[in-house]
Amino acid sequence: MSAREELQRVDRAAMWLSGKRGDEYVASIQLGLVLGSGLKSFADVLANRLEIPFSEVPDWPRPKVEGHGGSIVFGEIGNVRVACLTGRVHLYEGWQPAEVVRCVRTLRRMGIPRFLLTNAAGGIGDGLVAGDLMVLSDHLNMTGQTPLLGDHEPAFGPRFPDQSQIYSERLRTALLGTGTGLRTGVYAGLLGPSYETPAEVLMLRTLGADAVGMSTVHEAMALNAMGAEVCGMSLITNLAAGISAHPLSHDEVIETGKSAAAMMSNVVGQFCRGLS
């Protein structure tokens, strides 16, 4: 599909969602949130909620992985209006890069100025333990793919977007200022769906990665190109292969996400109140 056709799909979804929530409400949304594995319950804390399944939004892909939500929730934290995606789709499910970022591009085309991307990740960096929250300072795109590939569509940003500050220093400082002992580090995004081998983890550590997962990097690239202010946060759900003493499992990722939901809700709540 051409970039022009992709833009038409994005704008069709944006117009439909604006009609559901109301143009005036949408125009006042300050933050877009993407929730990673096991973290979808955060959306339950929103006031004045309007939840819409991905399956109802025109042209939106639907997550296929257990433990991942599949809805957009409009609501409020304090007096800050947010649009929250309770899940995402991944390359390893068979989606194309443009489909992986279609939901966040839709929110950006609706005028949402800033985004917090969250994920579940394996810990690589020294001192990281399961349950830690790590604010992203940068990322390594190790998927071999990009949502910017193909013919150029100016509405999605410049042909050659700068990525020297893909994660906003201002928003990163705001997250770290919530007083919760958050860490900072570099996130490596891989294709998946298999977990990494010990040799691959050693490679990533050598390249400077502190955590590894299977999402986020394409969303950050697409939003950065479109001029959005982006920040990211990883929940360390386990230690990566070769660091962990036991085999990795998706069940562990989901359970750690559930147990950390209250902590993450507190961090994001404080972050949102700071935006106001």
Image (cartoon, helix red, strand yellow):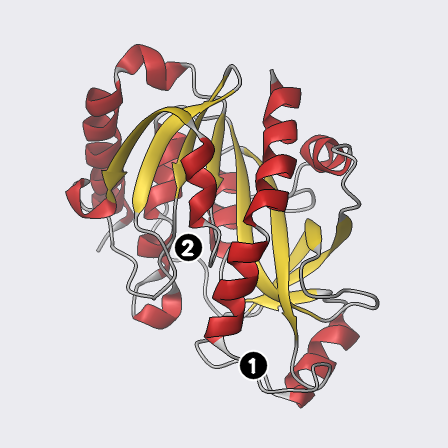
Of residue 47 and residue 20, the one placed in the foreground of this image is 47
Instruction: Answer few, some or many: residues within 10 Å of disc 1's Cα (few below 14, many 20 plus, some between 14 and 19).
Output: some
Residue sitting at the far top: 24
- The image shows residue 105, relative to residue 259, as above or below, that is above
Q: Disc 1 marks which residue?
A: 248
- Looking at the image, residue 250 sits to the left or right of residue 151; the answer is right
In the picture, the quarter occupied by the C terminus is top right
Residue 258 visible in the current orientation? yes
- Looking at the image, residue 94 sits to the left or right of residue 117; the answer is left
Image location of residue 71, percent across then percent down? 30, 44
- Looking at the image, residue 227 sits to the left or right of residue 20; the answer is right
Q: Pick whichever of labels 2 and 1 is earlier in the sequence.
A: 2
Amino acid type shown at disc 2:
Pro
Of residue 44 and residue 196, the one placed in the foreground of this image is 44
Of residue 232 and residue 254, the one placed in the foreground of this image is 254
Instruction: Answer few, some or many: residues within 10 Å of disc 2's Cα (few below 14, many 20 plus, some between 14 and 19).
Output: some
Image location of residue 48, percent across then percent down? 36, 21
In which image quadrant can residue 140 be found?
bottom right
In which image quadrant can residue 181 be found?
top right
Q: How far apart are labels 2 and 1 at the CA level?
A: 29 Å
Image location of residue 180, percent across then percent down? 76, 41
Which residue is drawn at the image coordinates 43% and 29% (left, top)?
A: 46
Judge depth for marks 2 and 1 and give the one in front.
1
* Helix, strand or loop status at disc 2: loop
In the picture, the quarter occupied by the N terminus is bottom left
Amino acid type shown at disc 1:
Leu
Residue 137 visible in the current orientation? no
Which residue is drawn at the image coordinates 24% and 29% (left, top)?
A: 17
Q: Disc 2 marks which residue?
A: 147
Image location of residue 152, percent across then percent down? 37, 46
